Image (cartoon, rainbow, N blue to C red):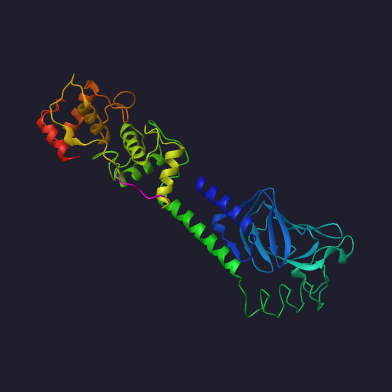
Amino acid sequence: MAMKKNLRALIGSTLAALLLPGLALAASDDVTLTTDTVLSVAGVTLNVSGSSATIETITVNSDNFSFTLQNGSSIQVTAPDLNQISASTALMKTTDTCNSSSSILKYEGTGQQTVTITPLTALCSSTGSGGSQASESSSGGGGGGGGSSSTATTATTATTATTATTATTATTETTATTQTTTTSTTDAQAQLNALLAQLATLQQQAGGSFTQDLDVGASGEDVRALQRFLNTTGFAVNATGPGSPGNETATFGGLTRAALARYQAARGISPAVGYFGPVTRARIISEQSGGVASAPPTTPSSTSSFTMDLETGSTGSEVQALQQYLNTHGYTVAESGPGSPGNETTRFGALTRAALIKLQEANGITPAAGYFGPKTRAFVEANP
């Protein structure tokens, strides 16, 4: 669905822009990396890349970050300043380079296996040419930085504030009893949460994806969602029957076009011809998400101007006002051209008569002959 694709892209760009610890994304909205993402973790710069890396989860903390890949995806972590990189597991690791010219870890799809990456202050050049990174899963072995060193650069059993697993100071991830959260991290989390909530609301309220232009003859759930929006915002598609509130259909016909034209005219969208294109789509989505206040529909002309009977051959402004009334109340004079919504004329012809007969038949006005006399005039004035 397009909304989900937009959501993924937006989360990906937000994550790359924030560059802050403490952010977490859940598996319900997978992230697909198509360009490098720069993270700053424990003061160390890491480049995270993948030509098509679909991430189930990713969590960025103050001194490490963890991820779970979908099967078939790959991800590469590079330390451009040649810092050593500690990994929680060697499973599914396909590249492990740590020497005087590069520091790289690469993993293929990990399924449900979560990998935690911890950058260290020690540089790969200190391990000698051809060395490899430390893996936390081999806590009893040598690894890249030694297995039992007590210095600040070890990967497994160090007891200083920079270790990832067995450190006893307040800044470690696992055994620390307190944790300091910076104001910038809190603000970034709040911004991300607000963004996700707004997008979720938008998806729920839209009722249709609105990913395509719509015109007379179109069909599908987008049409039904459009009719539902028009019916609930004062621009009823039909008073009764198909298209009326609660009876929306999946077919875009003349009634839908007329209702949409009224909406466009009320919102100042030009041309107001009943075509559902990019401008109208953006406005409706914005209203649904609460971005733009909905204005009440406008009445195209006052019915108090009807002072005479009208029939085939009549001309003048009252004929034009009658056509406007018919077009805006579900009795379209013409689908396009003269007499259509926004193109009302001052001439009472066969199309005006036919539309007037429909109004009279629908409202029990007899005889339903297309003559605009006292009965019909009284009805119109009572139902502006």
Going 61% across and 72% down the picture, which residue do you hit? 181
Residue 62 on image: x %, y % = 66, 69
Instruction: Between residue 103 and residue 69, name the one nearer to us.
Output: 103
In the image, taking residue 150 as reference, residue 169 lies left or right, namely left
Write down the region rendered in magenta: 292-296
Instruction: Between residue 16 and residue 88, name the one nearer to us.
Output: 16
Q: Quadrant of residue 379?
A: top left
Residue 77 drawn above or below residue 270: below
Residue 319 drawn above or below residue 168: above
Based on the picture, tell me whether residue 346 belongs to the magenta stretch.
no
Residue 287 on image: x %, y % = 40, 48
In the image, taking residue 321 as reference, residue 94 lies left or right, namely right
Residue 144 on image: x %, y % = 82, 67
Q: Main secondary structure of the magenta part?
A: loop
Residue 156 on image: x %, y % = 76, 73
Going 68% across and 75% down the picture, which residue do you hit? 172
Task: Please count the marks in the image.
Answer: 0
